Image (tube, helix red, strand yellow):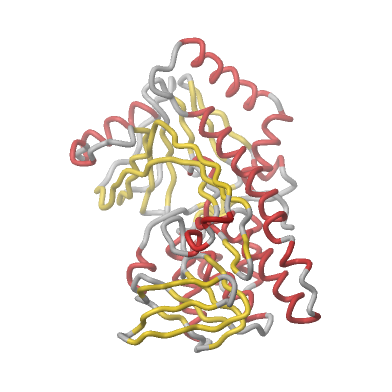
């Protein structure tokens, strides 16, 4: 097989890159280890930054997003029995976020790829990447295949093979957090028009939604938490406590049809490239979910890479490819800091003493009372400007 760009991974990063290259007349092959059904059903992030929505709209894959996505102009920070709204749009010149599940974004991108009759191979195995030749060897439908290309895009996630292929050339920065999120999907009407981030003495909680009938909620737990010890009744009781207000508040409860525990970590590798292999998305960085940045950051990476490849194929200009890692990492570290800021401000670490608890409350008070502090949070939350 031959293509100008070989893309390993059919998550948001790989599929958006393939779409952006298609619109620029650059050929690509997308390779995915999982089945189409698995990829389209994998529940992940659901908050899209303004620039992510703009990117998908310009790429012509946002019809369902605009029909079904829930546009939010603010978020609520809840602590001390009080709720405080952060006016995202008012503080950022009209920018907003859109709630639309990552799996729905993936469905839209896969449909566009298949409609264009462009190569998208599911259930490939024994993938081996050579960054110097560059080639990707793989097995598909029982046959051993070699994909020859000019460039390889490693969009295969944290557990993929592409980063391992560059192991000797990378510096790793990481931090494991002493808590995790127990997340649920429930058939219940959202209890708020906007997302609620709650800091409580019992731990953090987040109330979100996926549709007018489906809610997505999280509560802080330990990374070793046994999900079997969390029956539905216990989950709802804990969430009700953490979202309590002095003036009274009750979550709408319903059938929980999905739940799981997600450990939290920060992870970055530098550089995000070597030879003709370029890492993007979770293959290069992981952020705590508190800032809602994972998918948005992955799409920001491939926007940079698509522009660099367009210049390379149009005129032979390699400057964009050479500077890919540097340009992406500026955004990556800013987003890491914001995600760390949100995480440390809202979560209760094990053994937290009264002094630390008061520091958290002081930070929350400042963010909700200072326009400058609220604007900084809002600008980062709706997303940095496009590069």
**Quadrant placement of the C terminus:** bottom right
Please give the name of the residue rendered at 67% of the width and 32% of the height, measured from the top-left corner.
374
Residue 69 image position (x, y, % from top left): 51, 60
Please give the name of the residue rendered at 38% of the width and 77% of the height, measured from the top-left corner.
122
Can the viewer see residue 112 in this picture?
yes
Image position of 77 (left or right of 270): left
Residue 324 image position (x, y, % from top left): 70, 61
Residue at far front of view: 168
Can the viewer see residue 62 in this picture?
no
Image position of 123 (left or right of 65): left
Question: In terms of depth relative to the viewer, which is nearer, 38 or 87?
Answer: 38
Question: Eyeballing the image, is 22 above or below 204?
Answer: below
Question: In terms of depth relative to the viewer, which is nearer, 202 or 118?
Answer: 118
Quadrant in the picture for residue 273: bottom right
Question: In terms of depth relative to the viewer, which is nearer, 334 or 182?
Answer: 334
Please give the name of the residue rendered at 58% of the width and 24% of the height, measured from the top-left corner.
364
Residue at far top of view: 354
Question: Eyeballing the image, is 199 above or below 121?
Answer: above
Residue 116 image position (x, y, % from top left): 53, 87
Residue 199 image position (x, y, % from top left): 46, 26
Question: Eyeballing the image, is 101 above or below 209?
Answer: below
Tally of numbered discs: 0
Image position of 360 (left or right of 214): right
Image position of 245 (left or right of 26): left
Question: Eyeballing the image, is 299 above or below 308?
Answer: above
Question: In terms of depth relative to the viewer, which is nearer, 168 or 335?
Answer: 168
């Amino acid at each position: 097989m031959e293509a100008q760009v070989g893309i390993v991974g059919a998550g948001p990063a790989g599929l958006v890159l393939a779409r952006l290259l298609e619109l620029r007349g650059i050929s690509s092959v997308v390779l995915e280890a999982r089945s189409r059904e698995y990829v389209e059903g994998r529940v992940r992030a659901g908050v899209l930054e303004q620039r992510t929505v703009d990117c998908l709209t310009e790429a012509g894959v946002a019809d369902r997003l605009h029909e079904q996505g829930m546009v939010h102009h603010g978020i609520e920070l809840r602590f001390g029995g009080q709720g405080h709204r952060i006016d995202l749009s008012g503080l950022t010149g009209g920018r907003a976020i859109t709630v639309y599940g990552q799996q729905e974004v993936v469905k839209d991108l896969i449909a566009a790829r298949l409609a264009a009759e462009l190569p998208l191979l599911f259930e490939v195995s024994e993938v081996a990447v050579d960054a110097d030749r560059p080639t990707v060897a793989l097995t598909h439908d029982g046959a051993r295949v070699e994909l020859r290309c000019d460039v390889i895009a490693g969009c295969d996630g944290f557990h993929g093979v592409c980063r391992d292929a560059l192991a000797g050339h990378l510096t790793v920065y990481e931090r494991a957090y002493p808590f995790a999120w127990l997340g649920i999907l429930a058939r219940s009407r959202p209890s708020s028009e906007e997302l609620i981030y709650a800091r409580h003495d019992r731990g953090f909680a987040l109330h979100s939604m996926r549709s007018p009938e489906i809610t997505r909620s999280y509560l802080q737990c330990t990374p070793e938490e046994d999900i079997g010890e969390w029956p539905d009744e216990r989950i709802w009781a804990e969430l009700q406590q953490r979202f309590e207000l002095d003036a009274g508040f009750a979550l709408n409860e319903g059938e929980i049809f999905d739940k799981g525990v997600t450990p939290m970590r920060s992870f970055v590798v530098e550089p995000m490239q070597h030879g003709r292999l370029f890492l993007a998305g979770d293959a290069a960085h992981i952020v705590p979910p508190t800032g809602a940045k994972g998918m948005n950051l992955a799409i920001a990476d491939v926007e940079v890479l698509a522009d660099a490849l367009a210049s390379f194929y149009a005129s032979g200009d390699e400057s964009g490819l050479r500077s890919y890692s540097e340009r992406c990492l500026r955004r990556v570290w800013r987003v890491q800091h914001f995600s760390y800021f949100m995480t440390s401000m809202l979560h209760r670490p094990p053994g937290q003493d009264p002094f630390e608890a008061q520091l958290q409350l002081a930070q929350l008070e400042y963010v909700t009372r200072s326009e400058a502090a609220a604007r900084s949070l809002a600008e980062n939350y709706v997303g940095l400007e496009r590069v």
